[in-house]
Image (cartoon, grey):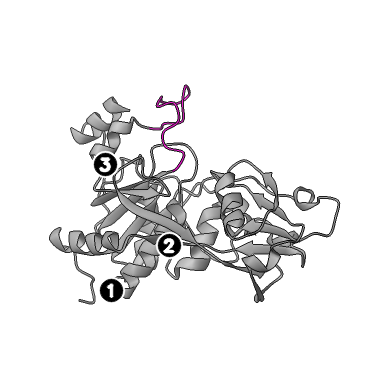
Amino acid sequence: MFLRRLLYWLRLLPSAGAGIPVIAIGNLTVGGTGKTPLAIHLAEILAARGWSPAIVSRGYGGTVRAPRGVSLASDPAEVGDEPVLMARRSGCPVWVGPDRVAVIAALRHEHPDCDIVILDDGLQHYRLRRDLEIAVVDARGFGNGMMLPAGPLREPRTRLWTVDAVIAHGTDRVKGYAMRLQGEELHRATDARERRAVQSFAGERVHAVAGIGDPKRFFLHLAQLGVKAVPHPFPDHHPFRAADLEFGDAAPVLMTEKDAVKCKRFAKPQHWVLPVRAVPDSAFDDWLLRRLGELGHRPKAA
């Protein structure tokens, strides 16, 4: 990894710019750390300040090989579960593909008003130059501190020294901007208009399903809101089938929003979805907007 980064830095391996600012969000470990909610948060605050953001993702778990725009009707098996979620929540264009340089070119052709790109899970995609790098670290930390396959690290921990900002999601093990996930209201999977507070399930027998990077985080979130659910952890990006949500009773099944996009075809009235949003320290938002200005970047409309 060191040699690979060095070769890109020396321009011995080709890299390309996007023509517009790129903010790369990523982590050092395998598995989710809260990058997707953070990407949605960035899209929201940038749009509120006059930018026209777009999100670009690899589409992990999908099968696409060419640049493709993502919509609410997209199949998560083709474009990935997280891009469908981001398209639903961010209010901005979301595009996927393995070659992020080609994806941004296609995106800008279709959306010429786009003036900034949020690169989801793109910290290690050095072929695309970036203006800002943000690393997210969660409570799991760095495991045994070893690189794949001996440990969970994609890059050495020292990589944090070179990023522009570190987000500490639910942990004080690393120095960075604190972030938490907030969500206290569920909606029925078959009718999003019907909503219930998480606390209203306290005292009931309920099942909790999570196929995310750290399923325990979802179960703990429910427990902190008074819901002691029967936990059913699945691997990250698990391709859910109807049988996965059958537990031999009619008890409510609570699931993450990321998992729900893959269960839409066979959702039942007893399935409930918990949307969450990233709430970073307000100082992070101020830093991001100030840093973009210091780099000479302004929205096209400014």
Q: Nearer the viewer, mark 2 or mark 3?
A: 2
| Distance in Å between CA atoms under marks 1 and 3 | 30 Å
Left or right, 83 with respect to 302, comes to right
Amino acid type indicated by mark 2: Ile
The quarter of the picture where residue 38 lies is bottom left
Q: Where 13 falls versus 170 (above or below)?
A: above
Q: Quadrant of the C terminus?
A: bottom left
Q: From the viewer's perspective, tell me whether residue 4 is left or right of residue 83.
A: left
Task: Judge depth for marks 1 and 3 and give the one in front.
Answer: 1
**Residue 171 counted in the magenta span:** no
Q: How many marks?
A: 3
Using the rendered image of the protein, determine whether residue 126 is visible from the camera's viewpoint: yes
Quarter of the picture holding the N terminus: top left
For mark 1, give the secondary structure. Answer: loop
Residue 90, picture quadrant: bottom left
Which residue is depicted at the point 45% across and 71% down?
91
- Tell me the residue at 29%/35% (across/down): 159
Depth order, front residue of 144/41: 144
Residue linked to disc 2: 40
Instruction: Calculate the distance from the C-alpha at mark 2 to the C-alpha at mark 1.
Output: 15 Å
Residue that carries the numbered disc 1 in the rendered image: 49
Q: Where does label 3 land, which residue?
A: 15
Q: Main secondary structure of the magenta part?
A: loop
How far is mark 2 from mark 3, CA to CA?
26 Å
Q: Which span of residues is magenta-colored?
A: 139-154
Earlier in the chain: of badge 2 and badge 1, it is 2
Confirm or deny contact between disc 2 and disc 1 (CB under 8 A).
no
